[in-house]
Amino acid sequence: MTDGVPANPSESFEYTFGPDEDNVIFAWQPLYTESTLRRFVDRVNREKKMLRVETLCTTEKGRKAELLRFGKDENPGKVGVLLCARHHANEIWASFVLQGLVGEALSESPDGRWLQENVSFFVVPFVDKDGVEDGDPGKDRRPHDHNRDYVAGRYSTVRAIREKAVEWAKDKKIILGFDLHACSLEVRGKRLNNEKSWAHNMLFQIIRTTPHDSPRPSLFSEILRTVHRNEKEFIQYLPQHDGYNSGPIKDSDAGKSACWMRRTLHPTYCVTLESPFARPDGRPNTPADADTLGRHLAQTISRFAKECLTAPPIETDAMKPFPVLKPVPERMNDENRAFQSAPSLTVSPKGRLWVAWHTGATSGEDVNNGMVVATSGDGGDTWTPPLFAIDPPGPLRVLDPGLWTDPDGKVWLFYAQLYGMWDGRAGVWAMQPVDPEDANTAWTPARRLCHGFMKNKPIVTRDGTWLLPSEFMNCKPWSITKPFPPEFAFEMPEYQAANVFASKDKGRTVTFLGRAQIPPKDRDCTENMVVERKDGSLWMLVRTKYGIGETVSTDGGKTWTEVKPSAIQNPNSRFYIGRLKSGAMLLVKNGPTDKRIGRSRITAFVSDDDGATWLGGLVLDERDNVSYPDAAEGPDGFIHVVHDRERTKAREILHHRFTEADVRAGHLVTPGSRLKAIVNKAGPKAK
């Protein structure tokens, strides 16, 4: 047998059972040593002599460490990919992945042929060559192992990589720098996407370049997910904000190979990739599985490189509008979105429902966040898939959509746009459907209204003034990958509050009106919303660390009282409050009004006395991990509510349809009312 399956006695073992041994457990994995590599090289070069084996250096024990070269060094544009494996000699699966990658890159597939004609590969298959041949695991070897040696340069292979790779890279655009490893099913108990056990056939990323250095930080992962989608296994990876990927390179990490690549070669994308020794479901992991992963990596490299070479210059100006992406790009399709939250909803004059939510192809809040929009023409019984997206490339971010229908029947879609996670300024943008009753309508060009975020609805006061509640993050500009580029940072302390902007001309122009200050110890996400009370005063509720704070203005929103705790209890999460056509107030939140619980039990209440007391209590969704309700009332008297559930697992946007009578009764009494309908569910579809 070949390619890692035992071919001689030195690659197998025998065991004699003792007389008292009823059960013996064997842990074994196929070896991948120099002889395995030689068999692979010979097989490849019998078909096509393109894989060159050079000597990287001589090891401390006198062995020849291999350097594999293939591709076109003289190609126009000089694109380079650097690959390393077996910094830890015991991580054998990395070699099988690498073999699959090289095999696919040298194949006659479309991706393979493109790589051969356009990319130069520099591949070190055994960084710890002595460990590979001696059976020395090498991990955490003192004073440091090969993957901690890129500062000290104790090992000859590391010194040779530092010297020869730099020389090779001088006249090339380095698209990718990879270091292939193999991992256990669980690393220090770290949870990934709320699951303690890691996924089957998992690949995960550890170190990447900063987002302003790459076309889109998640692009490689998005392509890999697409390439791998027809497999039963699902690739998981650490999103950019999960620790390993954040911040400048620490002193303790500076000796790692991927950190050295990132710091010295400045690749477009730099990453450590891990494949598992075993599977959580108990199914054996085989060389064929690892080979498949490697082939998918090669296909991903090809498509990633093409996008990088043809990508327009990276846009960094958050003050420019970005076009509607229609149809929704593949990375934002239902099966590819890994995260979705914070939906908003409105109803057109004739009853069409519009819903928008904050989403992305990576599993959490990061610079890859964008927005999608769906609609229903039958009161929420059926929904379209996302009709379009706004998802600017690179470090620009779109989030927190808000939908609203103004008194003239015009539908508004608001959203925030900014650089990085928070640039100190952000901006509320707005666009409108030309025909809000048509699912396929065109939309007006987006325009910027004011600073900040506005996920909650405006109100119109009795004198016709539009009030727009805008929030600011309580922090200086920051990014997942620090330091934040100073040229994109804006510090505006005067807006660090629960702000109110006003318009006297129905949204054509917007000006700052006033702000309510939240004590710093209580300040978190503000997510403020305003209602006008019967006496003409304005009541603002804000999200705080303790739940809900409140403040009042008696001069139309110019000045506000000190923000103090409200009698309404809620977790540190978004809620909804607004006025119904009957004159009653509607409140939708987590749990009862007098008890603070977690993000569970989305419940609706009404008040006839401007919030002094609350009636009813219709539980819309009793489950955990439900949050961020938004509401709107339709022309037929039905109230519509949307919220999210399990943002990175179930990934559901839910819709409820009910009446004020249902809320007061505490259960559904109106024909046509119904709860927990799914607007959208993202993630891989069941096969």
Image (cartoon, rainbow, N blue to C red):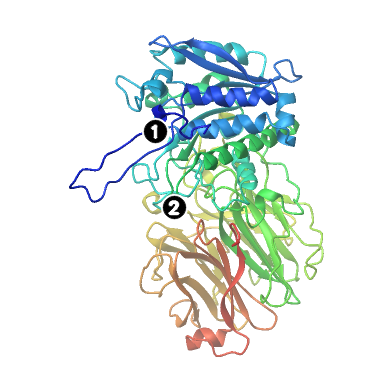
The secondary element bearing badge 2 is classed as loop
Give me the disc on residue 12.
Answer: 1
Q: How far apart are marks 2 and 1 (CA)?
A: 60 Å
Expressed as whole percent of the image width and height from the top left, the position of residue 18 reads: 21, 43
Tell me the SS state at disc 1: loop
> Relative to 504, is 38 on the left or the right?
left
Looking at the image, residue 159 lies above or below residue 483 = above
Q: Which amino acid does label 2 sit on?
A: Asp
Left or right for 660, reference 284 = right
The location of residue 14, given as percent across then percent down, is: 33, 36
**In this view of the protein, which residue sits in the foreground, 202 or 47?**
47
**Residue nearer the viewer, 458 or 441:** 441
Q: How far across and down, in percent of the image, does residue 1 sit?
A: 52, 34
Identify the residue under disc 2.
Answer: 524
Q: Dot 2, how many residues are within 10 Å of its Cα: few (below 14), some (14-19), or many (20+)? A: many
- Residue 50: give x, y in percent of width and height: 68, 21
As drawn, is 169 to the left or to the right of 8?
A: right
Can I make out residue 84 in this image?
A: no
The quarter of the image holding the C terminus is: bottom right
